[in-house]
Amino acid sequence: MAGSVTWRHDATTERWLRVLFLLAAALLHGVGVVVAAGGLALLGVVLWTGSTGARALVVLLALVGGPASLLYLLPMLRDTDQRPSFYPEEMTMGLALSVRQRVALGLSGGAVLVGSWWLDPRVAAAIVGGGVLAGLTYAVAATRGTIDTERAVLDTGAREFELDRVTGYRSRRLGPLSLVTLAVPNRPGRLGRSTTRLLVPTARLADVEAALDVVVATADPETGRDPNPQVRLAAGVLALLFLGIGAAAVVTIGTGIGWYVAALCGLFGGVLLLVAREG
C-alpha cells in the first residue's frame, strides 16, 4: 500500500514563485503606504488650514468611529497570536514576512507607484496591472498538499477533503504542474458530476497517482438518498410562481423597475428549478 504523499510548489521552493509573491506583496503594501501617506497629508492640511468645525470633526473621528480609532487595536496587533494575517493561507504558503520586510516592500512599492504616476499615469496603471497579474499567477501556481491513504484525506494546509468516495481520477500534464481531477459519483444535492481539481508538481505526479490508486481501490461509492418527490413538487411550484411574477412585472410595469423585478424573480426561479431537479 502506498504511504502518504506530500508535495509543495510555492514561494518557499521555487525562485520564480518567490519573485511573483514579492512583486504582489510590494504592490499590496505599496498601495497601503500611499493611502496612509495621502490620509496623513490630508489630515495635516485640515488641521492647519481647516475651520474650527472641521478640526472638531477630526478630533471626533480620532476618538470614535474614524480610522484613528483603530489605535485601540494596537495591543492586539502587538500580540503575534492575535495579529491578523494580510494574506490568505493559500497565498502565504508558509512564507512569513517580517515587519522589516513588509515595511521595506511597502516603502519601495509606494515609491515606485508615486514615481510612475508622476512620470505617466499609464505607467502606474501598467505597474498595478503587472502586480495584480503576478499575484493571480502565484495564487494559481502555488500548491501544497498531503494525501493520507490510510484515512483517505487530502490536506492542503488550509483545509482537509475526504476522499473516501472518489471512484476515479484523470491527470493532465501542464508543464511543471499537472492537473488532477478527482471524480465522485453524482447524488441528490450535487449538481452534475462532483469533481475536485488540484494541481501537483509534475515531478510528484507518479507518487500522487499511486496514492490515488489506493484511495480509489478502497472507495465507498455510495449513491445517497433518492430524490424526494415532495421537495421536487414544492420547488417546482415555487419556481413557476416566481417566473410568472417576473413575466407579469415586465408586461404590466415595464420600464426599468419591471425588468428589475423580473431579473430577481428569474434568479430565484432558476435556483428553485435546480432544487426541483435534484430533489
Image (cartoon, rainbow, N blue to C red):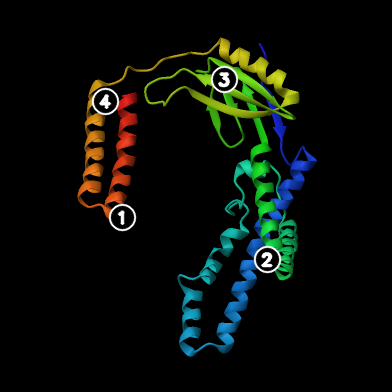
- Neighbour tally class for label 4: few under 14, some 14-19, many 20 plus, Cα within 10 Å: some
Q: Which residue is mark 1?
A: 256
**Looking at the rendering, in which quadrant would you find the N terminus?**
top right
Q: Nearer the viewer, residue 180 or 237?
A: 237
Image location (x, y in percent) of residue 150: 59, 17
Disc number placed over residue 30 in the picture, else none: none
Q: How far apart, in angstroms, are the residues tagged by discs 1 and 3? A: 55 Å
Q: Which of marks 2 and 4 precedes in the sequence?
A: 2
Q: Nearer the viewer, mark 1 or mark 3?
A: 1
Q: Nearer the viewer, residue 16 or 74?
A: 16
Q: Which of marks 1 and 4 precedes in the sequence?
A: 4
Image location (x, y in percent) of residue 134: 69, 47
Residue at the image position 54 percent from the left and 28 percent from the top:
161
Q: Quadrant of residue 230?
A: top left
Q: Which residue is mark 3?
A: 151
Q: How far apart, in angstroms, are the residues tagged by discs 2 and 1? A: 37 Å
Q: Which of marks 4 and 3 precedes in the sequence?
A: 3
Q: Nearer the viewer, mark 4 or mark 1?
A: 1
Q: Which residue is mark 4?
A: 232
Above or below, 206 relative to 85 = above
Residue at the image position 31 percent from the left and 55 percent from the top:
256
